[in-house]
Image (cartoon, helix red, strand yellow):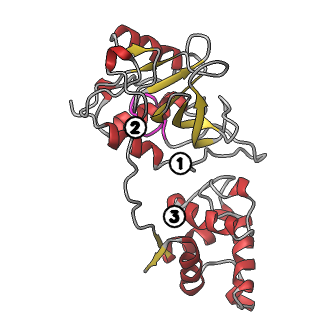
Amino acid sequence: MSFSRNAFVNLLRNQTGYHEGRDANGNWNNIQRFSPETPGLEWSQGQAWCATFTAWGADELGARSSWPITASCYTAVQWWKKANRWTDYPVLGGAFYLGSVGQDHVGVVYAYDENSIYTVEGNTNAGGSYQGDGVYQRVRPRRGANSPYGYGVPAFDEGTVSADPKLGGTRTASVPVPAPPQVRVSAAHIAAAARRDPGLRQGGTTYPAEVNIVEVALAREGLLADAYAHDGSFGSLSVAGYARLQRRYGYSGTDADGIPGRSSLTRLGKAHAFTVID
């Protein structure tokens, strides 16, 4: 079965900035897209999802037989070992596992050098927590405290690249980053979300992928707290932030009601590298 390292790593890296949902009190709640989108792991919704995130990536590429489809880091480690695809050295595109027996956390290595691994991980945070809030790219030590217990060795189409002397002994390696796609946002979708999302339950969404782009731009403008800029819900705080943006742009009255219009959204897009359509 075909399984491209570059496609897998970049699929996961493209999720960077995604965040799980929040409960009625505004706390992160482990509700995310990856459990329901991975057949067999729907039951894991609401639980720690670092392993589910990596399984989701393999499933998306039709490579379920080449990756442990499990929500358990410990079970995944045993899967790699049983398949005789386990090493103590970094593997490009491979899974790394943290904890005394690899039970605590997992992510995927997109680059490594003699001292560090560069990773993409779900259910972590900017500080590297094992129980975080979203998808982040991290730098972790190869050796010593907080270094990995070990690594899974996937059977990639491109072959294995690893620091393991038995697997080639490549000292440094990285997966190339593709040219970024043009980011498009529908003005009609954003306006619809701004009208609908504030009336939904906490964290309710209408067009989360596009809303996330606009919310990040609002946060960069200083108009929305970063903690609320990645949930994909154009809730009351986003509406209020957008109203402040409209007033900043010189709008008033009903033209500054927080419902994005095409002209203001286009201006915001030019400042933050997204294109407004329709």
Q: Disc 2 marks which amino acid?
A: Gly
Across and down, in percent, residue 267 comes to: 58, 83
Q: Which mark is residue 125?
A: none
* Identity of the residue drawn at 69% across and 83% down: 246
Residue placed furthest toward the right: 25
Residue labelled with disc 3: 210
- Please name which of the two marks, 3 or 2, marks the residue nearer to the observer: 2
Label 3, residues with CA under 10 Å away: few <14, some 14-19, many ≥20: many
Residue labelled with disc 1: 16
Residue labelled with disc 2: 57
151 left or right of 247?
A: left
Label 1, residues with CA under 10 Å away: few <14, some 14-19, many ≥20: some
Q: Disc 3 marks which amino acid?
A: Glu
Q: Is the residue 131 above or below the residue 104 in the image?
A: below
* Identity of the residue drawn at 46% across and 38% down: 36
Q: Is the residue 6 above or below the residue 91 in the image?
A: below
Q: Disc 1 marks which amino acid?
A: Thr
254 left or right of 1?
A: right
Q: Look at the image and give the residue range highlighted in magenta.
A: 34-41
Between 258 and 123, which is closer to the camera in this rendering? Answer: 123
Question: How many angstroms separate mark 1 from mark 2 (CA)?
Answer: 13 Å
Between 134 and 187, which is closer to the camera in this rendering? Answer: 134
